[in-house]
Image (spheres, rainbow, N blue to C red):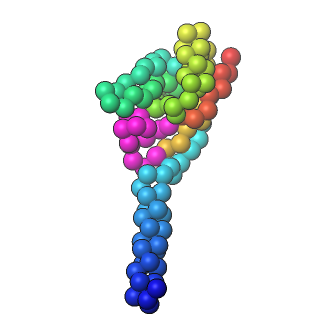
Amino acid sequence: MTVWNKIKVGLAVVFLILIGIGSYYVFGHFSDGYRGGTLIKLSRKGVVFKSLEGQLNIGTFLDNGREKPTSPIWDFSVKNDPKLFEMLNEAILTNRRVKLHYHEMFVTLPWRGETNYIVDEVEIVN
């Protein structure tokens, strides 16, 4: 192998590594956390890529006994996992509160869902 070919291979490897790092920052997650409330909607959406979408009523917050106006509805997408769907479906049918763990993504991709918030854990609270 000539020196020029070694340089080409080295540059190709560096380029692929940079593409991988860049892809992580563009398509990866940058935040995660928990939200709690009552599910009000759960549906499958999509023409080509089917995704599970939901809405959570997080309620309003109390400040010195007065309710603060907030947006009480939180839209989210669900990781493609049948167990998560079953737990969410049970919670919505029994009108029980849930605690959801989510990752917030930089970019919305059609096969991941319609929102930047991807739920990956569900805990039924009561």
Residue 20 image offset from top left, x and y in percent: 46, 62
Q: Quadrant of the C terminus?
A: top right
Residue at the far left: name it.
47
Highlighted range, magenta = 105-118
* In front of the other: 28 or 72: 28
Please tell me whether residue 40 is drawn above or below residue 69 in the rendered image: above
Q: Main secondary structure of the magenta part?
A: loop
* In front of the other: 90 or 55: 90
Tell whether 123 sits left or right of 67: right
Residue at point 59% right, 14% down? 90
Note whether residue 113 is visible.
yes
Is residue 106 within the magenta segment? yes
Is residue 47 within the magenta segment? no
Residue 39 image offset from top left, x and y in percent: 52, 19
* In front of the other: 113 or 6: 6
Residue at the far top: name it.
94
Which corner quadrant of the image does residue 33 belong to?
A: top right
Note whether residue 62 is visible.
no
Residue at the far bottom: name it.
3
Residue at the far front: name it.
1
Which corner quadrant of the image does residue 38 belong to?
A: top right
Residue at point 38% right, 43% down? 108
Tell whether 49 sits left or right of 67: left
Image label count: 0
Residue 121 image offset from top left, x and y in percent: 61, 32
Residue 43 image offset from top left, x and y in percent: 43, 20
